[in-house]
Image (cartoon, rainbow, N blue to C red):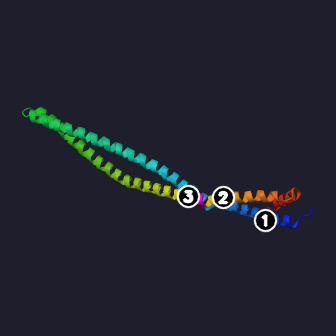
Amino acid sequence: MYATEHDIATLRKLQEVDRKVVSAKKEFKELPHRKAILEVRAKKDEALKRKVQVQDMLDEAEGKLAAFVQEDELLSAKQDEITETLSQVQGDYRAVTAHTRDLDGVRKRREKVSLELSRVEEEVDKINPVMKQIMQALADLDAKERDLIASFQKVGGSLRAAIEEGEKARVSLAEQVDGELLKVYEKTRSACG
């Protein structure tokens, strides 16, 4: 089998095109963007899990806060009711004593509720900044992910375009070479890489 000067020149061009395509494919597979995007997504998943935990804690604390506020309102109304009843039963020692005891019990319970209310408010005040930090971290991670994806699409797009262009050039060059010579070239190319 003999190859003409034209065949040899075409095979060299074909070899150069194949080399560029292989190089572009390798570079595309090794782009750091993919790994970086996966790392950002993993961090985002962790932040979302943390957000759910903190949100559960915040919901629980706010539920307690609402319950204590409601109980305090009920106790306040009861205290007002007992005070009014006391003003109406001013001559009856037993009734005054009983209502005074009730009033004292309501006052003590309101003090306990007030302490619990303060404790829960402090808890909510501690949780809210953590939630804001998590939300900020999620926003930052979203922005970073968008930037990485845009960069990946830009760099990866140019590499894919180079690969497609090289494969089209390869097809047109392969048509210019003798069939048997092309088979030998393909066999050698697959053996050598």
**Is residue 9 a member of the stretch shown in magenta?**
no
The image quarter containing residue 71 is top left
Q: Which mark is residue 146?
A: none
The image quarter containing residue 5 is bottom right
Label 1 vs label 3: CA separation? 34 Å
The image quarter containing residue 40 is bottom right
Q: Position of residue 22 (x, y in %)?
A: 73, 61
User: Which secondary structure, mark 3?
Assistant: helix
Q: Horizontal placement of 154 versus 15: left or right?
A: left
Q: Amino acid at mark 3?
A: Ala
The residue depicted at 48 percent of the width and 50 percent of the height is 48
Q: Which mark is residue 161?
A: 2
User: Which secondary structure, mark 1?
Assistant: helix
User: Which secondary structure, mark 2?
Assistant: helix
Q: Earlier in the sequence, mark 1 or mark 3?
A: 1
Q: Which mark is residue 13?
A: 1
Q: Name the quadrant of the C terminus.
A: bottom right
Q: Which residues are magenta?
A: 149-154
